[in-house]
Image (cartoon, rainbow, N blue to C red):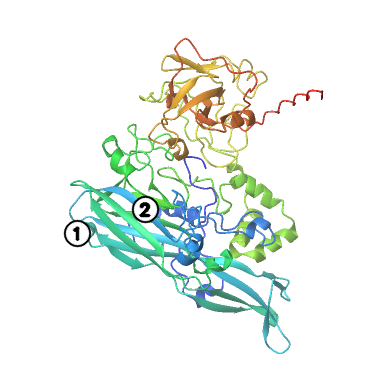
Amino acid sequence: MPDAVAEDDVARAATAATAEDSALPAGPAPGSGPGPAGFEQLSAVADAVLYEGYLLYPYRRSSPKNRVRWQFGVLLPRDWVERDGPVAVGVSGSADSWYQQTECLLRMRRPDAAVRVRVRYLQTQHKQVEAAGPDGGHRPVPSLRADDGTAWLTFDEAVPRETDLAVALADLLDGREHTASVGAPGGEATEPLPSGAGRVVRRREEVRARTTLTAVRLADDLVRLRVRTENTGRSADPGAPREEALRRALIATHTLVGGDGVEFVSLIDPPGELARPAGECRSEFTFPVLGGAPLAQADGTQAYGGREASGGSTGPLLLSAPIILPDRPQIAPESPGDLHDAGEIDEILTLRTMLLTDEEKAEARATDPRAAEIIDRVDSMPPEVFARLHGAIRSLSPAGSPAPAGPSTPAGPPTPAEPPTSGGPFTPGGPFTFDGPFASDGPFAPGGSSGGERPAWWQEGGDEGLSPTTDTVLVDGVRVGGGSRVLLRPRGRGADAQDMFLAGRAARVAAVFHDVDGSTRLAVTLEDDPAAELHTWYGRFHYFRPEELEPLTAAEGPETPAPSAPPGPPGAHAAPEPPEAPAPAP
């Protein structure tokens, strides 16, 4: 996922427009209810987390990938989860568990400081279509078409749930933990179909869960806060299939944390003096990051997202999600609405949805109300909205006023002029647009790379003279290129979370690549990776900027790369060498 945004499938619809909403308490809509004023800043990102992978393109029940759902932040009954032994703890919620724990650091700015927590998740709901019988009874069927031509399909839906907790920080520091129920009731609702063709029955089972808050004072104004949510229910049958256990589970569970008189510390990029206590925080099956709007920079501008400038190492809000995000994730403003499809790009999904046949669209509408909303929105999308999906450049500045180079960012080539629009189809002389509405790490822009006299990249010959396997780049006075040994030093602020796991590891440079915006990236393989040779053969590398590397090669120049394994461009697959002919038998 791009560093500046959360997933592109923003679930802006609060609840599905289904009949049970009036017959059963469906819980508050996402983003509603009491809580810190800043929670609404995170509502779009939090909804994207809530509906991550809820329903995948082509949004039809018959699609195989929509038969295996609910993959993130799933908290199941403990007896079901541990039927084969304890689960392995990880930093994200891609594995089923029975609990989720967030530990974070906060500074207490006044004696009456308070902590506010919002726990959010989905509760599954089975939609059963039943056909009317001649005796007045009903029988379950997989699908039914009413007299008016409307199709109805049996399917699993979900209802959004959220619970707010508030507690004085002083009470927690006195050793009094705060526990609240965050479960949801079961229920049933019936919706008759037109002309007496049948009915739709929606059922959901009770979800039992609790959230506990505890805190420990580490210094006069420094506190470690723990938020632990547990599924306290029991499975009807610990040996039952997963789809049955999901009926009593919390799905896509995540937590928003704010407060009054408190300031949260980034665990990705903590201030130097807090690096050790930040490293001692133990979050399990979730990944906490700073949330909220970007903070103002020294020049009065704002950074979009966390890659180029995170706005500092502290903030007023925290989002603890079952997927790995950067600090201060945001939704791109070009995104017209929810697509649900786990990290895909709005433009691609919109084009594909447009290509569905009328029969496929009808099945998608009958599958789920949210799928119907997507189909209807795509079918009625104005051309100017669709044009914006083709991309945006977020880090350009006016020509002649390049941003000053920071201590960890050496001065690069001149910054191209700001484009007249933020997106739209590519035209020569205008901005090159990324395929999707999201700013990426190293936005694409017109212009050459390190050779300022080269023609623009889209012109014939624009890439002449570039050779990834032999090009070099100057790093701390040392020429680094293919074969050079380096230490990985991901920059603290705004670094990709996956890159930070590699900090301090030794690697070998495979190639030097030049982006169309003039920036440079080095493809590397880890020296202690047993599969390094295989990755090189396939052309699969880790990519780092020059300022994120520390040369280990002598200053006279890089080593000569081995010609037998030339790397290709990112994602390329090298052709295998033909096998040697076997020696003749004696």
- Quadrant position of residue 298: top left
Element type at mark 2: strand
Numbered mark located on residue 102 in the image: 2
Report whether 508 appears left or right of 146.
left
How many neighbours does mark 2 have within 10 angstroms: few (below 14), some (14-19), or many (20 or more)? many
Residue at the limit of the structure toward the top, as seen here: 556
Pick the residue in front: 32 or 472.
Answer: 472
Q: Position of residue 455 (x, y in %)?
A: 61, 18
Pick the residue in front: 63 or 502.
Answer: 502
Q: Is residue 133 above or below residue 308?
A: below
Where the C terminus falls, by quadrant? top right
Q: Marks 1 and 2, Cα distance to the nearest angstrom?
A: 20 Å
The residue under label 1 is which amino acid type? Asp
Q: Position of residue 566 (x, y in %)?
A: 63, 22
- Quadrant position of residue 260: bottom left
The residue under label 2 is which amino acid type? Thr
Q: Position of residue 554 (x, y in %)?
A: 45, 13
What residue is disc 1 on? 174
Report whether 174 appears left or right of 322.
left
Numbered mark located on residue 443 in the image: none
Element type at mark 1: loop
Q: Position of residue 190 (x, y in %)?
A: 58, 79
